[in-house]
Image (cartoon, rainbow, N blue to C red):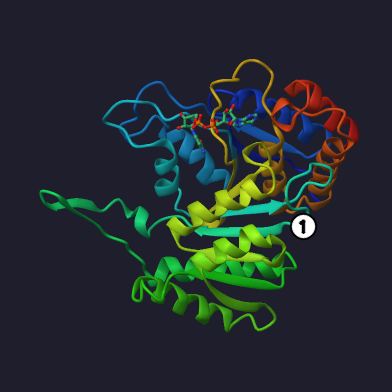
Amino acid sequence: STSTEAIRATLFPGDGIGPEIAESVKQVINVAGVPIEWEEHYVGTEVDPRTQSFLTWESLESVRRNKVGLKGPMATPIGKGHRSLNLTLRKELGLYANVRPCNSLPGYKTRYDDVNLVTIRENTEGEYSGLEHQVVKGVVESLKIITRQASLRVAEYAFHYAKANGRERVSAIHKANIMRKTDGLFLQCCREVAAKYPEIKYEEVVIDNCCMELVKDPGTYDVLVMPNLYGDIISDLSAGLIGGLGLTPSCNIGEGGICLAEAVHGSAPDISGKNLANPTALMLSAVMMLRHLRFNDQADRIHNAILRTIADGKYRTADLGGKSSTSDYTKAVCGHI
Ligand code: NAD
């Protein structure tokens, strides 16, 4: 954006290490000179009857109004009579696609150094529709729902993403040889969308084969789109390929163009409040949010500063084998910006 007018974005610092790493993100965004005004919302201590959740109606309205936000990890409160926080966000904001880029970090050694793939997961239906029941004692049944509407929507997003980000290929991941109707419909929808993007290569890969190839040679994959359950599994597998949860960002795309970026890790209660957490995943999630807002230069500067800090190796947090605190690492990243 060339405008200097401040953009309002919702920030959920979240629980546990959330507030510490959210502070790091605010600092790097500030140093990069991005004119963002954060509307901070915390998870409530009582269930809001309007949302049946600890997330208040006002928090959800803030995201709906701003259409853009960043979410720290949220610890799921224990007890009955409320919906899970992540489920509330997904349902209320219509977050239909979860986008997770996985790139090898230069200088941080893992088994592979050429991972550069993006998983795009359908986020609203499939095996996670919540329709399970007991038929008779000892027999339970779970319904996998696949709709044309949700499949087209996530396929459209995958091809749009591929085109907008200069990607060459979209692979639809499926098990349609067994799940003929459900995954068959998903594939049919992907094919229809693929036909509208002749410049993007399209292929279909059976999920078991995909897993084997991902661990053998992840560099061969580009953009992957898939139904909910497969996406849950493959996106964590992909995160593992590049060094784990402290490094992996994601972004949820919702109805009306909502973009809610989030780190994929949890609230890490074991290290919370100790200035030990790695803020990289949330920083990279913020970078995704900035790209969505077309602050591409600032996004690149923050991204490069993170890569340089990790590659230098002088300031690294404990999860990457270093000795730095959250705040010292953040300072180093700010210095590189
Ligand atoms: P977790 O991701 O919080 O922690 C797993 C391990 O990874 C811990 O050892 C932790 O210290 C480490 N870790 C995670 N993030 C790190 C970071 N940024 N830097 C350094 N180390 C990091 O998973 P968990 O312990 O299973 O879950 C804790 C809580 O988080 C639970 O209440 C769970 O429901 C919630 N959770 C929330 C989300 C979310 O909001 N999206 C996701 C997963 C878990």
Picture residue at 27% right of the left edge, 29% below the top: 80
Residue depicted at x 38% and y 58%: 125
Left or right, 72 with respect to 83, comes to: right
Residue 302 visible in the displayed image: yes
Residue lying at 36% horizontally and 71% vertically, measured from the top left: 182
Q: Quadrant of residue 29?
A: top right
Q: Position of residue 274 (x, y in %)?
A: 65, 15
> Which residue carries the number 1 mark?
114
User: What is the x, y in percent for residue 82?
Assistant: 31, 33
Q: Quadrant of the C terminus?
A: top right
Q: Is mark 1 within 8 Å of ligand 1?
A: no
Mark 1 Cα shell of 10 Å, populated few (<14), some (14-19), many (≥20) = some
Find residue 176 and report its image quarter.
bottom left
Q: Is residue 193 above or below residue 288?
A: below
How far from the left and from the top, in percent, is residue 275?
69, 18
208, above or below 16, in the image: below
Residue 209, relative to residue 321: is it above or below? below
Q: Pick out the residue farthest to the left.
A: 136
Q: Is residue 314 left or right of residue 135?
A: right
- In the rendered structure, which amino acid carries the disc numbered 1? Asp
Whole-percent x and y of residue 149? 41, 69
The answer to which of 112 and 332 lies nearer the viewer is: 112
